[in-house]
Image (cartoon, helix red, strand yellow):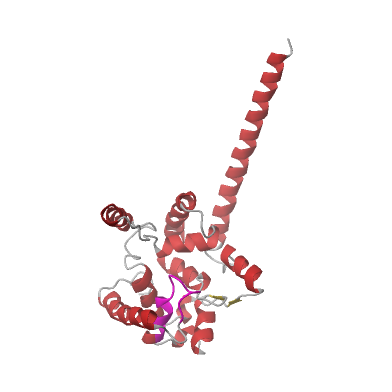
Amino acid sequence: MAQPFAKSDQRRSIVDWVWIGIKFLGGLFVTVHVYALILFYAPVPATATMAERVIEHGRVYRSWTPIEEVSPHLVRAVIAAEDTRFCLHNGVDVDAIRTALDERERTGRLRGASTITQQTAKNVFLWNGGGFARKAPEAWMAVFIDGFWGKRRVLEVYLNVAEWGDGLFGIEAAAWGRFGKPARDLTAGEAALLAAVLPSPNKWRVDPPGPYVASRARGLLARMNTVERDGLAACVFLP
């Protein structure tokens, strides 16, 4: 006669745990979005990738720099290298995703279609790895910060949290570490070299650049001219 009560208790226990999970996820959702709102005004204190590098190497080098103090060459170089449609999409580039999926059907290879905004969302709020399990929250946060922060703030945060290799985080640390000068004084060639290594900053070198990086930087210089000519970075620069 005690069995029905045992089953009832078990069901209540499952419901309790589900409710706890829902409350936890709801609280996490609210916390992340409140944090995102704060970061519209405040510098990002740290990221998961920075924590990983501290564990691996003992320290990182970083310095927050307002976008007004970053060379326009660097802004154009990053957009040319990572996301030429940065000013046109809402944080997620649906056209780029479709193109990548079509290319996968033809060639069997899947190339990246993450925007600068998605990379910023991943760096600030999420973690490296995780595959498709990370992509959904990454896309959501990308759309959220694109709408709330605006393009200029998104790129400012990206430039200040991106990893540039050897424990260098943020463009100011990268400019001093690679060229011994502040970010505002970077030339077009130096900006192209820095942007050229962004896909794999701990593998590819700027000092000195190998043949692949040098070739990629030359290509980026031409694309930077296109970005400037066609106003593809206009959403970043103040009128």
Would you say 170 lies left or right of 77 here?
A: right
Q: Is residue 163 visible?
A: yes
Please say if 199 is above or below 179: above
Residue at 47%, 69% (x, y): give it: 158
Span of residues in magenta: 190-205
Q: Name the image quarter holding the N terminus.
A: top right
Q: Quadrant of residue 209?
A: bottom left
Residue at 52%, 77% (x, y): give it: 65
Q: Which residue appears farthest toward the front when viewing the image?
A: 108
Q: Quadrant of residue 39?
A: bottom right
In this rendered view, identify the residue nearer to me: 116 or 215.
215
Please say if 91 is above or below 202: above
Q: Is residue 72 visible?
A: no
Q: Count all numbered tags in the image, as a single digit.
A: 0
The image shows residue 227 at horizontal and vertical percentages of 29, 75
Q: Which residue appears farthest toward the top when viewing the image?
A: 1
Q: Quadrant of residue 168?
A: bottom right
The image shows residue 145 at horizontal and vertical percentages of 46, 58
The image shows residue 6 at horizontal and vertical percentages of 71, 19
The answer to if 211 sits in the magenta stretch is no
Residue at 35%, 81% (x, y): give it: 217
Residue at 44%, 60% (x, y): give it: 118
Q: Which residue appears farthest toward the bottom when viewing the image?
A: 180
In this rendered view, identify the residue nearer to me: 44 or 164.
164
Would you say 175 lies left or right of 237 here?
A: right
Q: Which residue appears farthest toward the right when viewing the image?
A: 2
The image shows residue 193 at horizontal and vertical percentages of 40, 82
